[in-house]
């Protein structure tokens, strides 16, 4: 595992395709061995996502920073990278091997501005399940702003073990605060969870 400081992540993310997921959803991905599109079977972070171009068409959403012109990348990077660190306590990011998807990759230009809901320039889509064997790098980004944890494909077991530990802590907090599960508003629930995670400084425990 390598630690990547926030100051260096802009260069690191410039190449590759990335799929963002949550701790809960990754467990399903790990068991199935594939990434599948959300056809309504998974909880969405934002309600407007149900009207997105990818969701409507049954596609897997990916970030493609490599195909974006450098000036556009520099201009919008801080906005885009925010999608990679807002889940509490951590967001998981999977870097996909472009060569294994290129023939069927649906470009950003397929969606229409003013008509479709999508992320301009950076979001692309894939119409079929993506096998985990296509993942080159596994990344953990904690919401508290700490360094990024990067695991190459040969370190998947270590990544899975770290994710399992985070989930154990997550379950412990929720078991002590069962009322959190009754809060349907995802953002409100995340804010309350964040207070609990801040109290135990979860990322500092896992990066010692």
Image (cartoon, grey):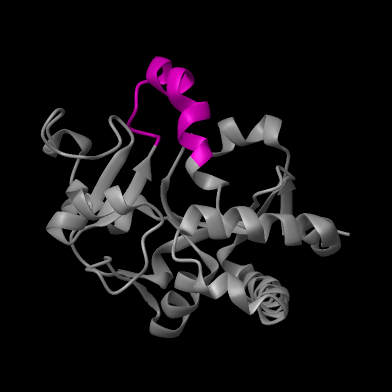
Q: How many marks?
A: 0
Q: With respect to residue 14, does 98 lie above or below?
A: below
Name the chief secondary structure element in magenta: helix
Q: With respect to residue 89, does 143 lie above or below?
A: above
Q: Nearer the viewer, residue 100 or 159?
A: 159
Quarter of the image that includes the C terminus: bottom right
Q: With respect to residue 75, does 14 lie above or below?
A: below
Quarter of the image that includes the N terminus: bottom right
- Whole-percent x, y for residue 184 in the image: 44, 65
At x 20%, y 40%, the residue is 107
Q: Nearer the viewer, residue 97 or 195?
A: 195
Which residues are drawn in magenta?
A: 65-82
Q: In this rendering, does residue 66 appear at all?
A: yes
- Whole-percent x, y for residue 176 in the image: 73, 79
Quarter-of-image position of residue 137: bottom right
In the image, 116: left or right of 186? Answer: left
């Amino acid at each position: 595992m390598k630690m990547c400081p926030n100051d260096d992540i802009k260069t690191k993310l410039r190449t590759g395709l990335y799929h963002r997921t949550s701790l809960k959803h990754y467990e399903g991905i790990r068991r199935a061995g594939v990434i599948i599109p959300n056809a309504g079977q998974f909880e969405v972070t934002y309600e407007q996502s149900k009207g997105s171009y990818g969701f409507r068409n049954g596609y897997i959403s990916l970030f493609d920073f490599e195909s974006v012109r450098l000036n556009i990348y520099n201009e919008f990077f801080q906005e885009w990278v925010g999608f990679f660190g807002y889940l509490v306590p951590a967001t998981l990011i999977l870097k996909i091997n472009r060569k294994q998807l290129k023939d069927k990759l649906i470009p950003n230009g397929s969606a229409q501005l003013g008509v479709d809901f999508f992320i301009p320039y950076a979001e692309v889509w894939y119409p079929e399940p993506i096998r985990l064997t296509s993942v080159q790098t596994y990344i953990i980004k904690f919401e508290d702003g700490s360094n990024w944890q990067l695991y190459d494909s040969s370190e998947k077991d270590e990544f899975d073990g770290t994710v399992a530990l985070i989930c154990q802590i997550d379950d412990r907090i929720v078991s002590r605060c069962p009322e959190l599960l009754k809060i349907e508003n995802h953002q409100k629930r995340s804010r309350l969870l964040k207070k609990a995670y801040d109290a135990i400084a979860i990322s500092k425990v896992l990066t010692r």
